Image (tube, rainbow, N blue to C red):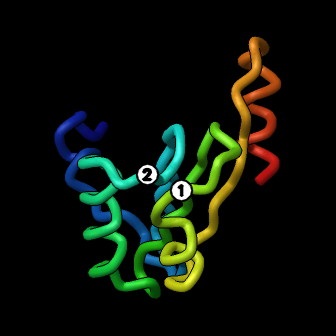
Amino acid sequence: MMSKHSQLNKKPVKDNRPLRVLQIGSRMACGGAETRLMELFRISNQDNVRFDFCVVKKEPGYYDSEIKALGGQILQCPLTKNILQFLGDVNEE
């Protein structure tokens, strides 16, 4: 029987798919958190890491055009009072 620690140390199986990262926020404005995310997005290797951005506001964000130019996707998922509907919208994209 394997101990918990030996299971944690097992290396994950490597495949050719990029790691997918979903950033969720109100919109990609020019704030501190958004600017830091963009710094990370710009230096990331798109073959290894794919950033997608889920925004809840319909207004365009400051970084939207740059995100699209760098190959990122912006998913609009307006907030609703029904959390299950919101999660369904996120999952569909």
89 horizontally vs 11: left or right: right
* Residue at mark 1: 61
Q: Quadrant of the C terminus?
A: bottom right
Q: Amino acid at mark 2?
A: Ala
Mark 2 or mark 1: which comes first in sequence? 2
Residue 53, label in figure: none
Q: Quadrant of the N terminus?
A: top left
32 horizontally vs 92: left or right: left
Residue 78 location (% of width, % of height): 73, 34
Q: Is residue 30 above or below residue 25?
A: below
Q: Amino acid at mark 1?
A: Gly
Q: Could you give the CA–CA distance between mark 2 and mark 1, rounded to whole angstroms? A: 5 Å
For image coordinates 49% across by 40% down, the residue present is 25
Determine whether the residue tagged by mark 1 lies in a helix, strand or loop.
loop
For image coordinates 49% across by 77% down, the residue present is 66
State the residue in front, 27 or 3: 27
* Residue at mark 2: 29
State the residue in front, 23 or 63: 63
Q: Is residue 14 above or below residue 20?
A: below
For image coordinates 62% across by 56% down, the residue present is 60
- Count neighbours of disc 1 (C-alpha within 10 A) and say few if under 14, some if 14 to 19, many if 20 or more: some
For image coordinates 24% across by 34% down, the residue present is 4
Residue 3 location (% of width, % of height): 22, 35
Residue 92 location (% of width, % of height): 81, 48
